[in-house]
Amino acid sequence: MQFASVRIITDDVPGLTGFYEALTGLEAQRVAPVFAVFAAPTGTLAIGDVVTAPFVDATNRSGSAAIVEFLVDDVEAAFAHAVTLGAEAVLEPATMPWGNRSAIVRDPAGTLVNLFRPPAA
C-alpha cells in the first residue's frame, strides 16, 4: 500500500482551491472543474467537489476529524496570512509540550489546518 493524498470535499472547489493557493504559494493543477490537486515533494493535497464523494456531508462547517498540516518557516506570519485569507483562528500560535511551535486555523470548508515548526535543532 502506498499513501497517495489527503482530499478535502467541498461544495466550492474554486474558492477552496484559491484559498490553498494563496496560503501555500503553490499553484493547483485543475484536472477537472470538480477536482484540483496540489502536488508537492512532501505530499499531495486534493480538493474535490461533493459529486466526487456523495457520501460526505460537505455542508457541515463544524470541521472534521482530520487535520491538514503544513511545515512553515514562521508560524506567526503563516497564521496571520491564513486569517487574512478568511481562515477562522482556532489556536493562536503557541509552543506545544513536545516543542513544536503551532497555530491552527479552520479553512473556509471547515477543515482544521495546523501551521507548525519543530523546535530548532
Image: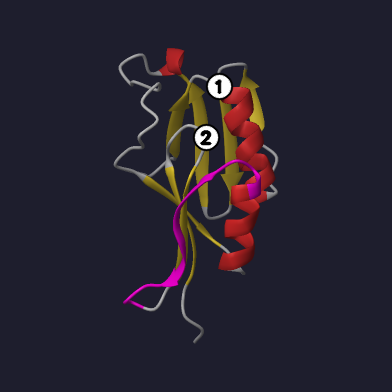
How many discs appear?
A: 2
Q: Specify the label residue 108 is tagged with.
A: 2
| Residue stretch in magenta | 84-98
Disc 2 from disc 1: Cα separation: 9 Å
Which residue is nearer to you in this view: 62 or 118? 62
Q: Secondary structure at mark 1?
A: loop
Q: Position of residue 15 (x, y in %)?
A: 62, 27
Which residue is nearer to you in this view: 26 or 31? 26
Q: Is residue 105 left or right of residue 54?
A: right
Q: Is residue 69 left or right of residue 77?
A: left
Instruction: Tell me, yes or no, whether the two marked residues, 2 and 1, touch with CB atoms within 8 Å.
Output: yes
Q: Is residue 33 above or below residue 85?
A: above
Q: Specify the label residue 29 is tagged with.
A: none
Residue 88 among magenta residues: yes
First along the sequence among labels 2 and 1? 1
Residue 70 among magenta residues: no
How are the colours assigned in the image? secondary structure
The kind of residue on which mark 1 rests is Asp
For residue 59, what is the image quadrant? Answer: top left
Residue identified by numbered label 1 = 12
Q: Position of residue 112 (x, y in %)?
A: 42, 45
Q: Secondary structure at mark 2?
A: loop
How many other residues sit within 10 Å of disc 1, few (<14), some (14-19) or many (≥20)?
some
The kind of residue on which mark 2 rests is Pro
Q: Position of residue 83 (x, y in %)?
A: 59, 49
Which residue is nearer to you in this view: 80 or 4? 80
Identify the residue shown where x is 38% and y is 48%. Answer: 67
Q: Is residue 47 left or right of residue 55?
A: right
Q: Position of residue 51 (x, y in %)?
A: 44, 12
Q: Quadrant of the N terminus?
A: top left
